[in-house]
Amino acid sequence: MQTVELIRERLQALAPDILEIGDESHLHRGHAGNTGGGHYAVLVVSRHFEGVSRLNRQKTVKSLLKDLFADGMIHALGIRAATPDEYFHVPD
């Protein structure tokens, strides 16, 4: 199974309304410190994040993917985690 599919599978635990996963590895090829794991960006919109601080949202996402970090499949991860109200709110 590809890394993007593994990420998607694990983040289903958050029952996301929106889940977008981008593979940004091609932007980091040849960079110092790149040990071969992929670079990814995720957008997770979930009611699970209601009342949860930004830091704890990121910790939650990373904890669901900890084995992929440990196995070296993920080298870097950008996380945008929002509630539906935050994501869909249009400022006046």
Image (tube, grey):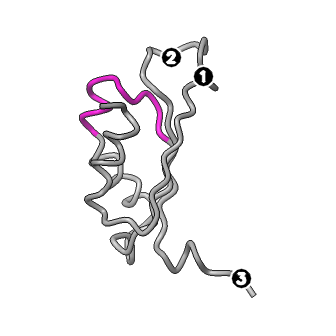
Q: Amino acid at mark 3?
A: Pro
CA gap, disc 3 and disc 1: 35 Å
CB of mark 1 within 8 Å of CB of mark 2? Answer: yes
Q: Amino acid at mark 1?
A: His
At numbered mark 1, what does the secondary structure look like: helix, strand or loop? Answer: loop
Which residue is nearer to you in this view: 32 or 73?
73
At numbered mark 3, what does the secondary structure look like: helix, strand or loop? Answer: loop
Task: Tell me the crowding category of disc 3: few under 14, some 14 to 19, or many 20 or more residues within 10 angstroms, Cα based.
Answer: few
Residues in magenta? 66-77
Taking the magenta stretch, the answer to whether it contains residue 49 is no
Q: Amino acid at mark 2?
A: Asn
Residue at the spot of label 3: 91
Residue 19 locus on image (x, y percent):
45, 57
Q: Residue at x 38, y 65 (%)?
A: 16
Q: Tell me which label, 3 or 1, sits earlier in the chain.
A: 1
Residue at the spot of label 2: 34
Q: Residue at x 58, y 13 (%)?
A: 32
